[in-house]
Image (cartoon, helix red, strand yellow):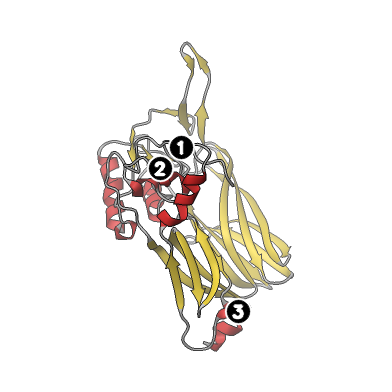
Amino acid sequence: DEALLQAPNVQLVFAGLDTYADIYINDYLVMKCDNMFRTWTLNPLPYLKKGENTIRIYFHSIFKVDMPKYLASPFQLQAWPNNDQSDIMLSLYARKAGYNYGWDWGPRLVTSGIWRPVYLEAWDNLRIENIQIIQDQVSEKSAKIRVVAEIQADENLENIRLTVRDPESGKTFGTVSTSLQKGLNKVTSAFTIRNPKLWWSHGLGTPHLYQFQTVAELNGKPADSHTVSTGIRSLRLITQPDKDGRTFYFELNGVPVFAKGANYIPCDNFLPRVSRATYEKTIKDAVDANMNMLRVWGGGTYEDDRFYDLADENGILVWQDFMFACTPYPSDP
């Protein structure tokens, strides 16, 4: 409509495209994508018109794209287990979930298509892009917290006020006044929480979560807000000399954790079929089996936010792999 076409900032977001994809808007080629794991964004305004518009996504054969890379390689890399189930290891040449090519636990089903939502966003003045919660020092007596807000501004803006508060009680944790430059800005609010309720893993205590709502005001009026749920905790990897070499264990709030867990693989060969109920059952099964940690395996995907939220709520620590598994990878950009 006319309002969207006149908006100062419009963004078309593709949260997941698997894998080699060309995006067309009204038959204009606007982006070429090559990574299943990342989000792709673009400004569609130069290609949009009032009324009906068409988005077309053309997915290339992953075999036709990657076979030339394999044939041009100075030596043939091998994967273990033989996840391509052949002598040709094409899985190494795409930023794509390795398990799609077959693994020792599952079938070879090399997927293609839109696997996460596509949506259109519009805004003016400013927008909170991302929030990072940094816990500098945590004990039972106090928690020193920094909330780092990434804020996109469409012009230089004065009289900006950033407030971090509890959305339920309305209690204010910290505030900061600042100005913004056109483009991406980082604004930090630092504060201390006295006698915090700590987050504990399953079996050690309650996995208490805090809600941090960050509100950005422009000239005294709310312009955007973003809420993050997180547990306040100190988590350290302890590696110290011992009689066998060096220790390797995690210390949560000063308490050594005996890790009890599992290797977590994707819940389905076809990821869009995974529902919240599936994630709830998966995390509940881990809790019922007295686990306190899940390792997100590098041959799968970076999981949906629902997975991590449920792990937080149920006291499950997450060991997060990068998405590389069981092989050397090509040394290219």
Q: Identify the residue shown where x is 45% and y is 74%.
A: 56
Upstream in sequence: badge 2 or badge 1: 1
> Which residue is depicted at the point 57% across and 52% down?
132
Nearest the eye: 325 or 330: 330
- Seen in the picture, residue 230 relative to 172 is either above or below; the reply is above
Query: Mark 2 Cα within 10 Å, few/some/many (few <14, many 20+)?
Result: some
Query: Which of these two is toward me, 193 or 333?
Result: 333
Residue underneath mark 2: 89
Q: Of the residues tagged 3 and 2, which is closer to the observer?
A: 2
Callout 2–callout 1 Cβ contact below 8 Å: yes
Q: Position of residue 84 (x, y in %)?
A: 35, 43
Three-letter residue code for mark 3 = Pro
- Res 46 label: 3
Q: Is residue 115 left or right of residue 228?
A: left
103 or 174: nearer the viewer:
103
Q: Quadrant of residue 92?
A: top left
**Mark-to-mark CA distance, 1 and 3:** 43 Å
Taking the spot 61% from the left edge, 61% from the top edge, the residue there is 163
On screen, 168 above or below 195? below
Query: Which residue is labeled 1 in the image?
Result: 77
Instruction: State the image coordinates of residue 227 (x, y, percent, origin top left).
Output: 50, 60
Mark 2 element type: loop
